[in-house]
Image: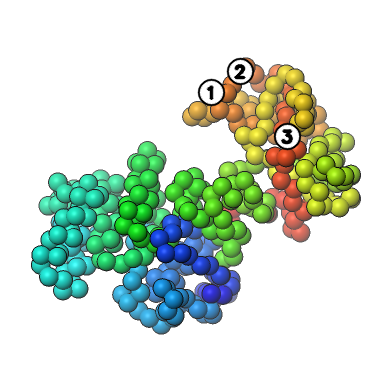
Amino acid sequence: MNVTKRFGKITALDHINLSIEDGEYVCVLGPTGAGKTTLLRIIAGLLEPDEGEVYIEGKLVNGVPPEQRNAVYMFQEYALFPHMTVWENVSYGPVIKDWERDKVERVTSEILEMVRLAERRDAFPHELSGGMQQRVALARGIASGARILLLDEPLGALDARLRVDIRTQLRNLAKDQGLTVVHVTHDQEEAIMIADRVVILREGRIEQIGTPYEIYSEPRSIFVASFVGGANFIEGNVVHVDSHGSTVELRGGLRIRVSNRDRNVGERVVVAVRYEDVTVGKRREDGSNNLSGVVESVLFIGGFIEYDVKLENDEMIASKILLSEVKETYKTGEHVVVSFPPEKCYVFPYPKTSLLKEIEAV
């Protein structure tokens, strides 16, 4: 509670308050330097906070050594013993805790079966793929008997395809075993896919905590809207407010409607619109904002087509459309209409610094 950690003049964590329920899978998401690893190490007992208190299972653990916290810290590099086999790595915790031999055998066998590595029990770490090494590290953590897993970028060393497969297995294993997991990552897709709740950390402070749906659909800041999912950011001034929403005037006199009624007439604002909420076509859509423009670029990325469109006021707006929903495609230089509904617009007060500074991930 109220945890602060400084390294010289740098404040890595600034009065952090975070509660995690038993059996919850929480992802701490943020850019490099946000304080994610520092937070994890403080929970693990590898660092002590300069201010604040840490509780595990209702007990104050400030000053309590890592081995007495009922938590296991999994490093980015897996930290497997290179001279030990898979079996020896996984059984290491139970052995040093002096469990009975039959129990060591049973627990190690069960966990190796669980992570589908029983057939590689006699292999050494250097003989395994990155994904297998990750599963050995996870199995060793589970075998230790700890009920809390602290994972520091556990999938960062894996290739993209394997990362997708392993993260689903990781969550399923944790849920099957009833473990509480704190999983640090800078990959927003990873966090959104596997977390019960996501903690957005930036410059040592919590920007937002919520379910993946809440984080994505109800961003509370420009940074969260940008970092999770991405969005178009349009600057303007509120020129009218009524019972149905507000009118925002953009540069060049263009006007759009938004459902938000919380801002005042004359206030400078930033309107965020998710890429996937912007459509591109030849006709104006009823009930939507419709702005004319010219296609500047077209990209095919995976199952999506992405357009960059220059509006009449020379501002750019991007659209990301599922290929399965594409009815017609457009070429560079073609005149089009971009449309987006007022209820899909997030409105934020203009930041005290600058819009670019607020969007920056570092």
In which quadrant of the rendered image does the C terminus lie? Answer: bottom right
Amino acid type at image mark 3? Pro
Amino acid type at image mark 1? Ser
Extreme-bottom residue of the structure: 63
Q: Is residue 118 visible in the rendered structure shown here?
A: yes
Extreme-left residue of the structure: 101
Viewer-nearest residue: 106 or 293: 106
Classed neighbour count for the residue bearing mark 3: other residues with Cα under 10 Å, few (<14), some (14–19), many (≥20): many
Classed neighbour count for the residue bearing mark 2: other residues with Cα under 10 Å, few (<14), some (14–19), many (≥20): few
State the mark number for residue 169: none
Q: Is tag 2's residue or tag 3's residue first in the polypeptide sequence?
A: 2
Amino acid type at image mark 2? Lys
Q: Is residue 296 left or right of residue 103?
A: right
Q: Quick check: marks 1 and 3 in contact, CB under 8 Å?
A: no
Q: Is residue 95 left or right of residue 223?
A: left
In which quarter of the view is residue 16 placed?
bottom right
Q: Which residue is mark 1?
A: 324
Viewer-nearest residue: 221 or 147: 147
Q: Which residue is mark 3?
A: 341
Q: Residue at x 14, y 52 (%)?
A: 121
Q: Position of residue 280 (x, y in %)?
A: 68, 25
Q: CA distance from mark 1 to mark 3?
A: 21 Å
Q: Residue at x 40, y 60 (%)?
A: 23
Q: Is tag 1's residue or tag 3's residue first in the polypeptide sequence?
A: 1
Q: Position of residue 235 (x, y in %)?
A: 78, 44
Q: Is residue 159 visible in the rendered structure shown here?
A: no
Q: Is residue 273 left or right of residue 135?
A: right
Q: Which residue is mark 2?
A: 327
Classed neighbour count for the residue bearing mark 1: other residues with Cα under 10 Å, few (<14), some (14–19), many (≥20): few
Q: CA distance from mark 2 to mark 3?
A: 19 Å
